[in-house]
Amino acid sequence: MEALEVSKLDQNFKHEIISRSGGEHFIRCFSCGTCTASCPVADVAEEYSPMKLIRMALLGMKKEVLSSNALWLCSLCYTCYATCPQDAKFRDAIEVLRNMAIEAGYTPPEINAKIEKLNRFSQEIRYEIIKFFFDKDKNRIAKINSMIEGLAGI
């Protein structure tokens, strides 16, 4: 890992985040790592760390944070809300950072729409699979397969 150059850090970045609705609490983070340890995305995606994103933002690594694909890996599941001892509300900060990334031109706006569709899809397919576990309805399998085939349209 290369050393940070203080002159390249944007010391105002954290203030930009906390000035927006949803970003006001992330500054409470003291890097305990509870968010990352409990995050279902971090469990399957080694490159994803909520704690790392928060630290980078607090340090002023604006370009690195806003251009990071990691911003879009969060499933907005609220696990970090439930586990954070400092109530940093990282999930809300992620939404703020995503909006900032779009506004700054790091991410095309259509990505956010696709992510929202994907989030909706994942909830719907989860529902259908759980229902199948209980009712064993073979028609539900056809519906699930159809949903998966439709995923290409996202």
Image (spheres, grey):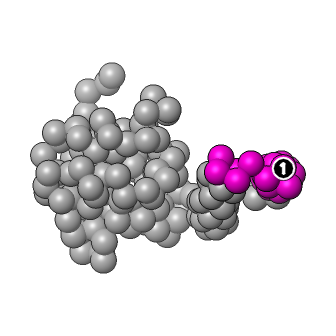
Relative to residue 23, is residue 85 depicted above or below?
above
The residue at 53%/56% (across/down) is 106
The residue at 18%/59% (across/down) is 87
Chief SS of the magenta region: helix
Membership of 147 in magenta stretch: yes
The reply, left or right, for residue 121 in relation to residue 48 is right
Residue tagged by mark 1? 138
The reply, left or right, for residue 105 in relation to residue 79 is right
Q: In x, y percent, where is residue 75?
A: 49, 53
Say if residue 16 shows up in the picture: no
Q: In x, y percent, where is residue 19?
A: 24, 74
Label 1 sits on a secondary structure element that is helix
Return the residue found at the far top: 1
Q: Which amino acid does label 1 sit on?
A: Lys
Q: In x, y percent, where is residue 74?
A: 46, 51
Q: In x, y percent, where is residue 64?
A: 40, 45
Say if residue 153 shows up in the picture: yes
The residue at 17%/41% (across/down) is 31
What segment carries the magenta color? 132-151
Q: Which of 3 and 74 is in front in this view?
A: 74
Membership of 146 in magenta stretch: yes
Q: Nearer the viewer, residue 47 or 140?
A: 140
The residue at 43%/33% (across/down) is 43
Q: Nearer the viewer, residue 117 or 123?
A: 123
The reply, left or right, for residue 67 in relation to residue 94 is right
> Which quarter of the rendered picture does the C terminus lie within?
bottom right
Relative to residue 125, is residue 33 depicted above or below?
above
> Which quarter of the rendered picture does the N terminus lie within?
top left
- Mark 1: give few (<14), some (14-19) or many (20+) Cα within 10 Å: few
Q: Nearer the viewer, residue 16 or 4?
A: 16
Return the residue found at the far front: 135
